Amino acid sequence: MLPRCTCQHLAPLILVYSSAVCLPSVASAKPSAAPSPSPAPTGLYVQAELGLAVVSNREQFARATALAARAGYRYEHWGAFTVLEFNTWKSPEITGATERVSAVNFGLGASYQFLDGFARSALAFGASMLVKETSVDEEAGAIGVFADARPLGLTWQPSKSWRLGLDPLAAKLMIPVLTGIPLIEIQYMTTFHGEWDSL
Amino acid sequence: MATRIGLALALVTSFVAPASAYTLQTGFSDSCHERLTVKAVVELLLQVPPPQLVLPDGTWDELAQRLLPPLLRGDLFRTNPEVIARFEEDPVVRFFILSVVLGVRAPDTSGHSVSDLNALRRIHADPSAIGQYKHSLRAPADDGLLGDLSAINGTHDVIREYVDQYVEAVSKPPSERIIEAELYLDFYDAVPLPVWEPFYILGQAIHAIQDAHSHTIRSADGAYVYSVLNYTEALTGELSVNRDGMPHSDGLDDCHGPIEVLVNRATATSRSLVIAAAGAAEGNWTRLETGLSACPEGETARTDCGWITYKPDCDAALIADDANAIERSCCTQANDFCGTPWLSIAEEGQTGPYLPSCECRIGRDSDTDACSAGLGYLAILALFAARRRPPPRPPLRRRPGHALRPMTGALLLTLGLAGSWTENAHARENEAFAALELHGSSLSDSSNHSLINVSFGYALRGGYRFGAWGATLIVERNYWVSTEFNAGVRPGVLNLGVGGEYIYGQGYLRTAVALGTSTLRYATPLDDSGTTGVYAELRMVGLRWEPGEHTALSFDPLTLTMLRPVTHAPVLRLLQYRTVVGIEGRY
């Protein structure tokens, strides 16, 4: 039997994903045998993040690293946030040497929490700025675009106002240089975060 | 006769005595440089007795036999039985052809994947003059008609430098003339291969002289250069034809197009360059300088001279700084480049900015047109069409390591977080299950790797769950899409594995891991079908939904799968970021 939502007429694949959206109502209908994580809070929150692209390169551990701060407002399951991120990655040169390229990303995003805040999905878009010149880009300051998709992450609430979380695999696309041959960086990252919320 | 002697000389000098833009074959373009080069050089190999050479060990010969015939399909390999026989019988011929083919590809790829975005950008966006002259293109400072002369002189210097290197290479003892170059193979990454250094260098010189026929606007007979094309400023969108020349053209790069005159001249000129290099190795540089000088008046049909010659009357007018003569004799946009028949082809597929109207920058005057992420995605697609150049690159140093090892911590943390949700850990009943899954992957984020990582397939998973924990058997077919030399679907691998899973979050979330064997289902250029290695899969968090008592649907938005069907060097190792959907029966 389908859960209480308007998903029944969708294709099976969409149903699977949308089931996540419908989960809260399902969850509330089921008896809980043991304590579960606290409900998703409503209010302001701030988040600090560390992201590592740990498997993408056979020569180096953590080819890319991201440090980010997120701040937003969560209303029940939905949230809106801004993100400011410093992202740096090792870029191989033709000579065999490695160059470190860095960008600052700023964006807006939306998130959705389900399973009483235990799981979440998020999507963000914004601008990406090259903060240091490279051997190809003689000047820093070029501004392009970035996108960050986190299909499924988990959170844990050790205290009332604090949460810890993990996004096991997230996909990032950054294009800080749009001119000439664009500088395009794709990263699959594992991200850890700590969050403080106002409630 | 002179040709025959010269070709023989080139081989002999490269081998014995210490005495010598067009498109590449890819999944996105047909072989031009390779075919023209082999056409120019292979006769040399047929006209001399097989040299006595101690060939290097390794897999290069197997690769040459599997890779080269399709790469050079048509022409000689289909129509000339002598070439086929020599190629099949004589490993030295295969070694030399492999060397010159890798050499002629090197300026465009430097051993990297044709879809390695980072490498292509570093190669193609090189604004240095020498970087452009290696492809017979204008440097950014080469403006106006004098810029044509500057670019031509620069290309002459590049060819002289290559011939210098060739002479130096042939002066080494034979055992030292075998060096290592890299070739990027689909799914293997860059594979180091031994090459015959003199021919590898000759291949790069031939690349430059062939580009001088596809990156210039020439007279109808191809004898004279009317104008040199421009790549770097075309890319940045700053190009003004009157100042910078016409943009680089895909039309002129396509050797299969209606430019036979130019293609034939490029082939003949390539052959003359080989003869000249052989002469230089013997101490006779006259042939090279003749080739780089204008032909005598009325002898423009010759290909041993006037390889890259600017229109003589325009050249003289520029030197004399005679404005009237310049206007009368030089070819510009104003006079449709002297009515050359190649102009319309040069206007086809002109290079331009990949992201038009998108220049955003802090601290400089900015074009504030909207720049969207959609355009960025288009850039990825557009970049696959990019082809051309770079400098030599040292071999990669690989550090053995297991790609999945660093993810172990993340997996444990995931399970730890999952364990915090305890409400259903003991609530689930034991059950058997069987599932059919479909999976696909698209992109890679690995350094020195093709951006494209398209694979797809299906899997059967069956097992038994003890409450929230489950044990799984997996049979999986994974198909691969190749892009490096030919675009197509390859049979990929058959994976067999065992795994474990944990279901939590009221049954809506699942974390799973699997390990097993991965078996090649087709013969690659280096390994036979049936070669077996290892397979591992991590599904950190996926969604499940149980709409009925005996059914479940699953969706894993992003999983990590490591395939290593070939564990000996060169290793075939794939890292796939997959999206997986499945339907499950539960009993």
Image (tube, coloured by chain):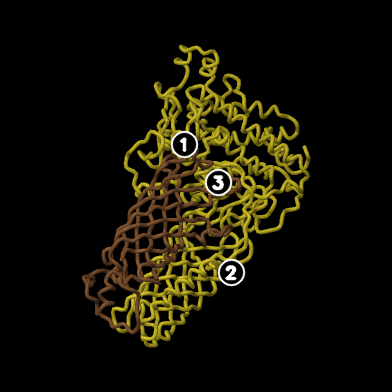
Chain colours: A brown, B yellow
Looking at the rendered structure, the secondary structure element under dot 2 is loop
User: B201 and B306: which one is in front?
Assistant: B201
Residue B110 higher or lower than B565, as above or below = above
Q: Which mark is residue B109?
A: 3
Q: What residue is shown with label 1? A: B252
Q: Quadrant of the C terminus of chain B?
A: bottom left
Q: What residue is shown with label 2? A: B531
| Mark before the other along the chain sequence, 2 or 1 | 1
Measuring from the top left, give residue B412's x and y in whole percent.
49, 73
Q: Are marks 3 and 1 on the same chain?
A: yes
Q: Disc 2 marks which amino acid?
A: Thr
Label 2 resides on the chain identified as: B
In contact (CB < 8 Å): disc 2 and disc 1 = no
Please tell me whether mark 2 or mark 3 is closer to you in this view: 3
Measuring from the top left, give residue B428's x and y in whole percent.
37, 85
In contact (CB < 8 Å): disc 3 and disc 1 = no
Measuring from the top left, give residue B58's x and y in whole percent.
68, 58
Residue A153: quadrant of the picture:
bottom left
Q: Disc 3 marks which amino acid?
A: Thr
Label 1 resides on the chain identified as: B
In contact (CB < 8 Å): disc 2 and disc 3 = no
